[in-house]
Image: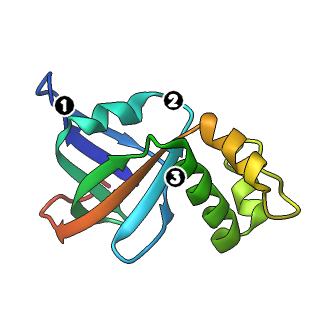
Amino acid sequence: MLLRYTGGRSGRSYSFPIGYFSWDDAEVVSFSSRRWPFALRQARDIELLIRRTAFSSTAEVMSDPQEKAALLAEFARRKGPRTARRLMLGLPGDRLPTAEEAADAATATTIVRFRLGARTAGASQE
């Protein structure tokens, strides 16, 4: 997925690829151990390019540790322990995580929930 947005303070345009997982209808999630997601809290004009289709979007950078742990546990349940382990957050790959394991992993990651809006005119540069 390609993330594009305008910085809330700088007014600069940013564009870079990030990993994502489909979540709910019109929603995808992204996980990062980096701090770039915090810039999205003030970002404007967020756009996601997913499989050559551009969407306007809003971003929720999750901050509540319990909500993050719950989402990680639900992620492992929905996508499977092996997929959850590939996030490289310390989640087990052979079983669902315990509440404590999910809480520990939540402290090591930033989770962004992107809600997809209308399709936009943005197109792939490929």
Horizontal relation, residue 114 to residue 91: left or right: left
| Number of residues whose C-alpha sits closer than 10 Å to that of mark 3, classed few (under 14), some (14–19) or many (20 or more) | some
Q: Position of residue 103 (x, y in %)?
A: 68, 45
Horizontal relation, residue 123 to residue 59: left or right: left
Between marks 3 and 2 in the image, the one whose residue lies nearer the viewer: 3
Nearer-N-terminus badge (1/2): 1
Disc 3: which residue? 67
Give above or below for 41 relative to 22.
above
Is residue 24 among what the camera can see? yes
Residue 75, picture quadrant: bottom right
Residue at image location 41% in from the left, 44% down from the top: 17
Q: Which is nearer the eye, 101 or 18?
A: 101
Spatial CA span between label 1 and label 2: 17 Å
Disc 1: which residue? 7
Which amino acid does the dot numbered 1 rest on? Gly
Spatial CA span between label 3 and label 2: 19 Å
Horizontal relation, residue 66 to residue 52: left or right: right
Between marks 3 and 1 in the image, the one whose residue lies nearer the viewer: 3
Disc 2: which residue? 34
Per the image, label 3 sits on a secondary structure element best described as: helix
Query: Of the numbered discs in the image, which one, if any, rests on residue 63?
Result: none
